[in-house]
Image (cartoon, grey):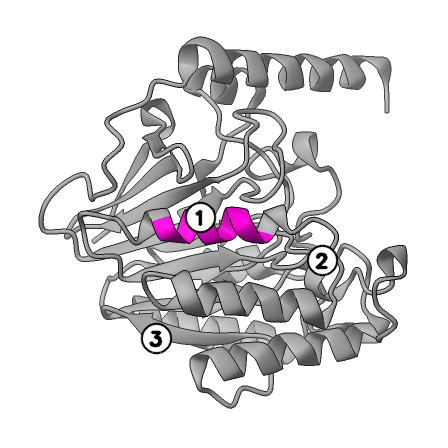
Amino acid sequence: MTFSTFMFKAMAFILSIFVTGIPYVKTAPSLLQTKEENCLLNVEMISDIHVEQMFKIKGEILKQGLIKMGESESEIDAVVVAGDLTNYADEESLADFYDIVKQYSPAQAIIAAGNHDIGHVGDKGVTNISREEAKQNVIKYYNEYSNQNLTTNYYSLYVNGYKFIVLGDDVLYGGSWDDIRFSQEQLDFLDRELAEGTKDGLPTFVLCHWGMSGINGENTVYEDTGIDPAEFDVKGIMEKYKNVYYISGHMHSGFKSKFIEKTFRLSNAEQVNGVTYLNLPSFGFLNMYGYPWPGTGAQLEVYEDKVVFRPRNYLTEKWFEKCEYTFEIEK
C-alpha cells in the first residue's frame, strides 16, 4: 500500500466516524413503522451476527433486536439476514442462532450463509469439521427452519409476490477462508431466477453475504474481498435485468453521511449500471467507516413506484434519516 493510499484510507476512516457520530446522526421518532401507507413489502434487514459460545452477548443482541422488530406498528413481511450467522462455523452456535430466530423473529427469515459459517472452520480450535461439512450443516439447519428439503446452499422464494434469490458458497476446490466460489450451476440458477422474478417489472432481490468488488466502497473498506466479475460474473448477470437489488454484508461498514459518500465514494446504497447495491453493517460487532455501534440494520419498503432503504438502530430504536435512499422502480 502506498503512503498516499494509506493516508486516504486513514482520513476516510476518521472522518466517516466523526461526521457520522457527531452532527450527522439525526434521529427521527423511534416508532418502527413504514414511512408511508400503501407499502407493498416491508422487510427488516440485518447482517453479520457472529453468534458464538465464548461471547453469548451476540446472541442476546440478536434476540433483543428481533424483539424490538416485533413491536413494529406496521406489519413486517420478512426478516433478511445477510450471512455470518456464527463466528466459527460450529454447530452449537448455528443451533443457537436458529433457536433465537424461531422464537423471536416477527416474520419469516430469509437467511444467507457467510464466510464465517463455512470458511472459518478450525478457527481458535472451535471446530474440527471440513468446510463441506460446515456447508451441509448450513443447509440442514435452514431446511429444518423452513420445512424444506434443499440440497444446495442457494435457493429462492417469494414474499408478497416479490422474488428473493439467496446465493451461497459452493465450496469448490476445498473452499477458501474468506472468498466465495460459485459453480456454473448456481450462476445459471441466478440467471433463470432473475428472468422469472423481473418479468412483470417487479423489483427482485438478490441476497449474498459478499459485496461486489469496487462497489459500496469495498476497495477502501475491505479490499480484495468482494466478488470479482472477472472470475464470477454475478454483476453481469444482474445487469441483464431491470429493478434488481443486491443485498450484502461482510464489510462491517457502518452507515455514512452523504458528505462521506461524495468525498470518499463510500456508501451503503448505490446504483451501478442499473443494479442497486445495498450493503448492511454488522449487527453483532462494531463497524468501520461510519456509525460504529452494533444493533444496526435497515428497513426495506417497496411501493408501487419506488423502493426505500431506511437505516435504523434496532437496539436504540432510532432512524438515521440522513442515510435514507429512495430508488424509483423502472417501468
How far apart are the alpha carbons under marks 1 and 3?
36 Å
- Farthest left residue in view: 37
Q: Is residue 234 something that shows in the picture? A: yes
Q: Which mark is residue 53?
A: 2
- Farthest bottom residue in view: 149
Q: Amino acid at mark 2?
A: Gln
* 45 with respect to 9 (left or right): left
Q: Is residue 47 above or below residue 309?
A: below
- Farthest top residue in view: 23
Q: Is residue 159 above or below residue 216?
A: below
Q: Amino acid at mark 3?
A: Glu
* Residue under pointer 1: 64
* Residue under pointer 3: 196
* 135 with respect to 290 (left or right): right
Q: Is residue 112 above or below residue 28?
A: below
Q: Residue at x 36, y 27 (%)?
A: 320
x, y (%) of residue 54? 75, 52
* Disc on the earlier residue, 1 or 3: 1
* Magenta span: 59-67
Q: Is residue 212 something that shows in the picture? A: no
Mark 1 or mark 3, whichever is nearer to me: 1
State the quadrant of the N terminus.
top right
Q: Residue at x 64, y 37 (%)?
A: 218
Q: Which mark is residue 44?
A: none
